[in-house]
Image (cartoon, rainbow, N blue to C red):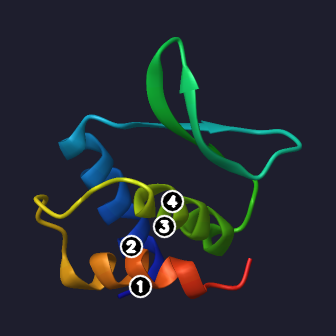
Amino acid sequence: MKKEKLYNEFEDLATRIGLRIIRGKGDFNGGPCIINNEKVIVLNKIKPLEQRLRVLASSFNEINLEDVYIVPALRAFIQDSNTLDF
């Protein structure tokens, strides 16, 4: 699956499970955090798409997604995030 399609699938998955993705610029890598008691994933929009995908994969890997339908290519990408080279 192309990287742009994976990114769009992550956005769709976040919407379906009620998780917000926040995009910002700055000197940070991004990842899951809690803002005003809301779980969110923060992405640095100036980082390369590959890095944003790794952040999303590792963030979603921390969430129990067993009962959520996920496109097989995206599920494999999330599961493989444990072995990705950061």
Q: Are marks 2 and 1 in contact (CB under 8 Å)?
A: yes
* Cα distance in 3D space between marks 3 and 2: 10 Å
Mark 4 = which residue?
56
Which quadrant would residue 18 be assigned to in this image? Answer: top left
Mark 2 = which residue?
6
Q: Could you tell me which residue is drawn at 71 percent across and 68 percent down?
A: 48
- Between disc 1 and disc 4, the foreground one is 4
Instruction: Specify which label sits upstream in the sequence, 1 or 3.
Output: 1
Which quadrant would residue 76 be assigned to in this image? Answer: bottom left
Viewer-side residue, 4 vs 53: 53
Horizontal arrangement in the rendering, residue 70 relative to residue 24 (left or right): left
Mark 3 = which residue?
57
Image height of 66 relative to 75, above or below = above
Q: Mark yes or no: residue 67 visible.
A: yes
Dot 3 crowding, Cα within 10 Å, few <14, some 14–19, many 20+? many
Mark 1 = which residue?
2
Dot 2 crowding, Cα within 10 Å, few <14, some 14–19, many 20+? some
Instruction: Specify which label sits upstream in the sequence, 1 or 4.
Output: 1
Q: Mark yes or no: residue 45 visible.
A: no
Kind of residue at disc 4: Leu
x and y percentages locating residue 31 in the rendered image: 62, 48
